[in-house]
């Protein structure tokens, strides 16, 4: 009971940052909810191309995070970078709302959102960490609740924005995302005095207008550069391959330069990051292929009410919110009893659950109606199992990787982790394109059902094989993490 009260009793700055993150995520996931469908229905882009554009945009979103973190820590200050990033995001959503059928304006809007997210994303969590003294027992609870803010914001937007776009038009749907950022900024400015004593070193110095001018001009140029990249995806893929190869080589060099326990831990970190790429490829089927499966092949009536099929995406954050406290309780209990599952084993279990979530789709297809539609309960179950897998991999991944590498590499590993997400986003877009039906919008549910059934069965089986390999290698990885206690840990895991 005392631990629960400790989690809830947080300093005032926490609540400012909590709602700031909630409304920023509301805006971002509002765009994500309808982007691929907008590209297909409004701009006439093929499903396969829309998935590739979505994946490349998502790659830019996560690929620029490290830049924003650096600017917050070393150049502008954490709080100034948060405000600048939020303004850029709001501008991006506003451009999206006015783009209409102009694909070039859409690319510019997406480029602006990518830059704004890159500026914003890393800094609220960085500011939150600065609000607690070293050893404060409330910190872990604060970050648990902070993750909850992300899911509350995404749940509300994934549920509401598709409805707004459906009834009031695409422009209004995108403008709702801009409204989310307006609320985030208004909330910040009203109570910003709560964080007056916190921030990075530049926050406590007068604003250097020369540096800010340089950052501002660079950010605008980056928006147009991102728009150009989205319009020339081959260039995007080449750049990602070059950067990714460079990061892997640097990581391998650091591993070779290290010795003993440190080397073992870094090898584990590299392996788990590579495993995470496979997971993210599967995960990003939700806003692409799985989203279009619900549009084409899932009944849209639940308990007599018509549901916008795009809103089924809100099931992911809903199940995350439901399952998070349960898993936290199980983690604590297993820690007390000494039967805690190792981190590599948790990753393997997360992949196995991801496999199960995909294999539910071909099973559902066997019970489809004569029209080729499946009951919504199947997709509810698929999202539940997927959410459990996400909590075991994404929910623990970044903290785990940071724990395994030496402190001198924490900034590098943060960027590398988000780079795995970027690489997976691009791959996921191409993979999701395999579900596109040649006949396009004229395809019936009976045409698309076997395509989706075969696709998700294949994805599920691939995930199952990867999960099996992860389970087999988990004891070895655990011994590398805990060389002294390796044998005991292996026995406990088994």
Image (cartoon, rainbow, N blue to C red):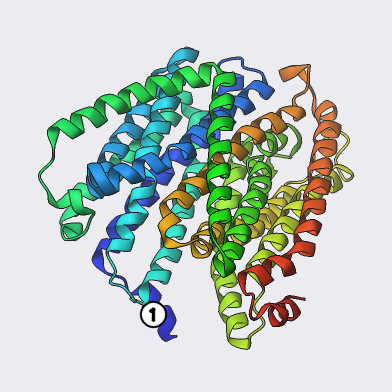
Picture quadrant where residue 423 is located: top right
Instruction: Tell me the residue at 62%/74% (across/down).
Output: 482
Position in image of residue 304 (x %, y %): 67, 46
Instruction: Tell me the residue at 68%/29% (across/down).
Output: 430
- Residue 180 visible to an observer of this rendering: no
Position in image of residue 60 (x %, y %): 48, 32
Q: Nearer the viewer, residue 122 or 103?
A: 122
- Residue 18, compared with residue 223, is above or below; it is below
- Residue 432 visible to an observer of this rendering: yes
Position in image of residue 184 (x %, y %): 30, 45
Instruction: Tell me the residue at 31%/24% (across/down).
Output: 220
Position in image of residue 319 (x %, y %): 60, 58
Picture quadrant where residue 267 is located: bottom right
Q: Name the residue carrying label 1.
A: 5
* Mark 1 burial class by Cα count in 10 Å: few <14, some 14-19, many 20+: few
Secondary structure beneath disc 1?
Answer: helix
């Amino acid at each position: 009971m005392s631990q629960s009260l400790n989690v809830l009793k947080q300093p005032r700055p926490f609540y400012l940052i909590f709602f700031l993150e909630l409304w920023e995520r509301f805006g971002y996931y509002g765009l994500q909810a309808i982007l691929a469908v907008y590209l297909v229905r409004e701009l006439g882009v093929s499903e396969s191309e829309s998935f590739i554009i979505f994946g490349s945009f998502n790659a830019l979103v996560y690929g620029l995070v490290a830049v924003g973190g650096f600017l917050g820590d070393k150049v502008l200050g954490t709080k100034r970078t948060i405000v600048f990033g939020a303004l850029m995001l709001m501008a991006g959503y506003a451009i999206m709302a006015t783009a209409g059928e102009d694909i070039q304006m859409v690319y510019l809007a997406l480029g602006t959102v990518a830059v704004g997210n890159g500026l914003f994303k890393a800094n609220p969590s960085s500011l939150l960490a600065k609000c607690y003294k070293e050893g404060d027992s409330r910190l872990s609870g604060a970050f648990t609740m902070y993750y909850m803010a992300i899911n509350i914001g995404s749940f509300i937007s994934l549920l509401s924005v598709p409805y707004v776009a459906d009834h009031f038009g695409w422009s209004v749907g995108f403008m709702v995302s801009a409204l989310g950022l307006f609320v985030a900024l208004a909330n910040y400015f009203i109570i910003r005095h709560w964080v007056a004593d916190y921030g990075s070193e530049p926050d406590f110095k007068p604003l250097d207008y020369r540096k800010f001018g340089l950052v501002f001009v660079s950010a605008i140029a980056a928006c147009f550069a991102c728009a150009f990249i989205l319009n020339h995806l081959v260039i995007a893929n080449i750049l990602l391959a070059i950067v990714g190869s460079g990061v892997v080589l640097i990581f391998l060099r650091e591993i070779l330069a290290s010795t003993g326990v440190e080397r073992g831990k870094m090898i584990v970190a590299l392996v788990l990051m590579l495993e995470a790429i496979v997971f993210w490829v599967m995960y990003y089927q939700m806003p692409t292929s799985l989203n279009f499966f619900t549009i084409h092949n899932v009944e849209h009536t639940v308990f007599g009410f018509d549901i916008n099929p795009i809103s089924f995406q809100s099931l992911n954050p809903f199940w995350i919110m439901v399952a998070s406290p349960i898993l936290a309780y199980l983690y604590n209990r297993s820690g007390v009893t000494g039967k805690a599952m190792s981190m590599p084993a948790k990753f393997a279990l997360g992949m196995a659950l991801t496999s199960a979530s995909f294999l539910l789709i071909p099973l559902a297809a066997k019970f489809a109606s004569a029209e080729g539609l499946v009951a919504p309960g199947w997709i509810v179950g698929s999202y539940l199992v997927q959410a459990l897998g996400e909590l075991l991999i994404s929910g623990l991944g970044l903290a785990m990787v940071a724990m395994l590498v030496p402190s001198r590499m924490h900034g590098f590993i943060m960027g590398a982790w988000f780079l795995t997400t970027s690489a997976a986003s691009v791959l996921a877009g191409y993979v999701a394109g395999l579900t596109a039906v040649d006949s396009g919008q004229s395809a019936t549910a009976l045409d698309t059902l076997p395509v989706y059934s075969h696709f998700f069965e294949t994805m599920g089986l691939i995930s199952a094989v990867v999960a099996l390999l992860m389970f087999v290698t988990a004891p070895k990885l655990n011994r590398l993490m805990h060389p002294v206690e390796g044998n005991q840990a292996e026995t406990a895991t088994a």
